[in-house]
Image (cartoon, grey):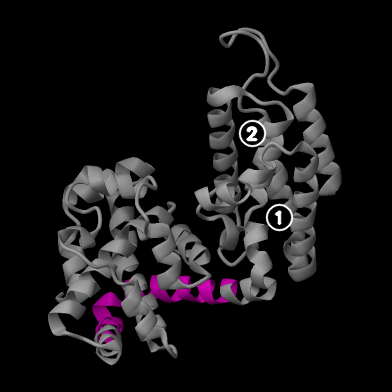
Amino acid sequence: MSGILGSLTSMIKPEMIGAIGKTFGVDTSAVQKALGAAGPLLLSGMAKSAGAPGGADALLKMLPTGGDGILGGFSNVAGMLGGLMGAGSGGGMLSSVLGSGSNAVGAALSKAVGFNVTPVLSMLAPAIMGIVAKAVKGGNLDGAGLTSMLTKEHSEFASNPANADAMSLVNSATQAGDQASAMITKFGADWEKVCGGPAAVLYMISASDPSGPVGSIKEAKAANDALLAEVAKAEPTSLIAAAFTAGITKDSLSGLRAHATNKAGLLPLVTTYANLVKTHAPTESRSYNDTLYAVATAAAHASKEGGFLGIGGTLVSADEQAALDSLKAALA
C-alpha cells in the first residue's frame, strides 16, 4: 500500500498497537481491525468534504503547517498515549473531517470492533491531516488537485477486493454518521445546548454540596464513566451516541462554567435542554432524561460529604439528595 494510507500505516508500530490494546483492555487483533478501518474512514471523510462546494478550499485551510510535528503524536508510544488520553487536539479536527455526525461514526465503529475507538480516531486525525499536508506541499496542489488526490486514493482502496471487510466497517460507520447528522440538523444551534446536559447535571450535584478538589475530581470521573456506560448501551444512530461518545468534554464544562455554582439556575437549564430534545427528537426524550439522571446519580455517589480524612461522612448528603429529587421530578 502506498500513498496516504500507506504512510499512515508505516507510522503505527507494533509496540503502539500493543499499547493501545493495553490502554483499552482489548486484544491486539481488535486494535488492528479498528486501525484497518480508521484510516480509510478518515480518508473517506476528507474526500467527501473536499468534493462538497467550497470543501476543498476549507480543507486546505485546515491542513497543519510546520515541520515534523505535523505528523501528530506518533514519534513514540508516550506521545501516542497522550493523544489517546485527550492531551492532543484531534477531537475538534475529527469533527471537521467526519462532519457533525462524527460521534455516531465513532460509536458505530466501536460497536463493530468491541471497544471505544473514538479516542483512536481523534489521535489519527491530526496524523492523516499531516500526511495530506506534506503531499499538498510536495505536489504544490490547489483545491482541485487535493480533491483529485483524495478521491483517487479512496476509490482505489474501496475497489480492491482485499479491502472488503474494512470497507464494510467504513460504510456502516459512515451511514450512522449521516443519520446522526440529519438528526442534529433539526436542532440547529440548540444542539450544543443538548450536548451540555451531562455537564449541567454534574455542576448541579457539585454546587448542591461542594466536595473540595479531591471530591470534585471523583465526581467528575464518576459522572463521565456513567455517561460513557450509557453511550455503550445506546445504538450508534441514537441521540445519546451522537451527543456523548466523547464523554463530558472540556468544551461543555467551559461553556457552563458561569453557571457552575448557581444552584438556582442549573435546574432550569437542564429542563430547557430536556425540552429541546422532547421537541426535536421526541423518541429520544426518555433515554436522554434517563442518561442525565444516571450521570447525576453517579456524581452524587462518588465521594463522601462531611467527615474528616475519609472517616465518617455521608455518601449522598441531604443537599445532594434534594438535588437528585428535584432533577428526577423535572425529568419525569
Q: Give percent across and percent down for residue 168.
A: 39, 74
User: What residue do we see at 31% from left, 41% from top?
Assistant: 22
Residue 205 appears left or right of 328: left
Q: Is residue 17 magenta?
A: no
Q: Position of residue 208 (x, y in %)?
A: 74, 30
When the figure is inspected, residue 185 is found, relative to residue 198, above or below; the finding is below
Q: Which residues are magenta?
A: 152-180
**Relative to 45, is 294 on the left or the right?**
right
Marks 1 and 2, how far apart in space? 17 Å
Secondary structure of residue under mark 2:
helix
The N terminus - image quarter: bottom left
State whether residue 314 appears in this view: yes
Q: Which residue is mark 2?
A: 299
Question: Which residue is denoted by mark 1 in the rendering?
Answer: 288
**Mark 1 neighbour density, 10 Å: few (under 14) some (14–19) many (20 or more):** many
Q: Identity of the amino acid at label 1?
A: Tyr
Q: Nearer the viewer, residue 263 or 154?
A: 263
**Among the 4 quarters of the image, the one containing residue 261:** top right
